[in-house]
Amino acid sequence: MSEVDSRFRRQYFHGTRADLQHGDLITVGYASNFGEGKVLSWVYCTGTLDAAIWGAELSVGGGAERIYVVEPTGDIVDDPNLTDKKFPGNPTLSYRSREPLRVVAEVTKWQGHSQEQIQKMKGGLERLKTERAEIID
């Protein structure tokens, strides 16, 4: 079967420490979840719960780690930070949009990564910063 089964809508997730409610919009113009201090001109989402968990675990701030189910309000495109530059294709189903993402639900039961895995990932991200890896906005 070569056609995609369209009976089910794809789910998109957003991991963060922001406290959002059903119907809230995640919009461009805010600082990155990852503490670079740079105001973003894109909003980000993923089609995998695991990638959203990483987003929540790695985001800065004192709030609780949260995973939201989001609905794009406009076009989404592959996130070049996590696609062909780092991984062939888009295995993490990572996307970005210039249009808002609408919060439609919160995932309240999820299993995070181990502290060892998180520290290893943070170490890798720090290495990228010191090597001045090009991060695409």
Image (tube, helix red, strand yellow):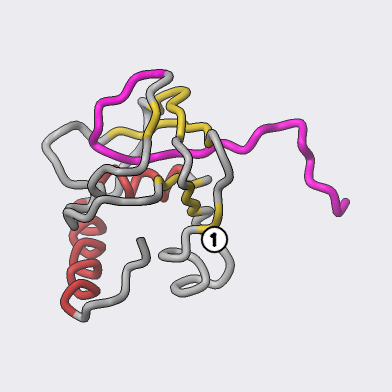
The image shows residue 119, relative to residue 113, as above or below, that is: below
Furthest-right residue in this view = 1
- Left or right: 126 with respect to 102? left
Instruction: Pinpoint residue 84: horizontal percent, then vertical percent.
Output: 52, 72
Q: Which residues are magenta?
A: 1-22
Residue closest to the eye, 15 or 99: 99
> How many numbered discs, if any?
1
The image shows residue 115, relative to residue 14, as above or below, that is: below
* Residue drawn at x 21%, y 81% as measured from the top left: 131
- Left or right: 27 with respect to 57? right
* Residue drawn at x 46%, y 74% as measured from the top left: 85
Q: Secondary structure at mark 1?
A: loop
Instruction: Pinpoint residue 72: horizontal percent, then vertical percent.
Output: 53, 36
Residue closest to the eye, 42 or 84: 42
Q: In terms of image quadrants, where is residue 75?
A: top right
| Callout 1 amino acid | Pro
Task: Tell me if residue 20 is in the magenta stretch.
Answer: yes
Furthest-bottom residue in this view = 131
Q: Main secondary structure of the magenta part?
A: loop
Instruction: Pinpoint residue 1: horizontal percent, then vertical percent.
Output: 88, 51
Residue position for label 1? 91
Q: Answer few, some or many: residues within 10 Å of disc 1's Cα (few below 14, many 20 plus, some between 14 and 19).
A: few
Instruction: Pinpoint residue 135: horizontal percent, then vertical percent.
Output: 32, 68
Image quarter (top left, top right, bottom left or bottom right) of the C terminus = bottom left
Task: Tell me if residue 82 is in the magenta stretch.
Answer: no
* Residue drawn at x 79%, y 46% as measured from the top left: 4
Furthest-left residue in this view = 62
Furthest-top residue in this view = 22
- Left or right: 109 with respect to 10? left
* Residue drawn at x 62%, y 38% as measured from the top left: 10
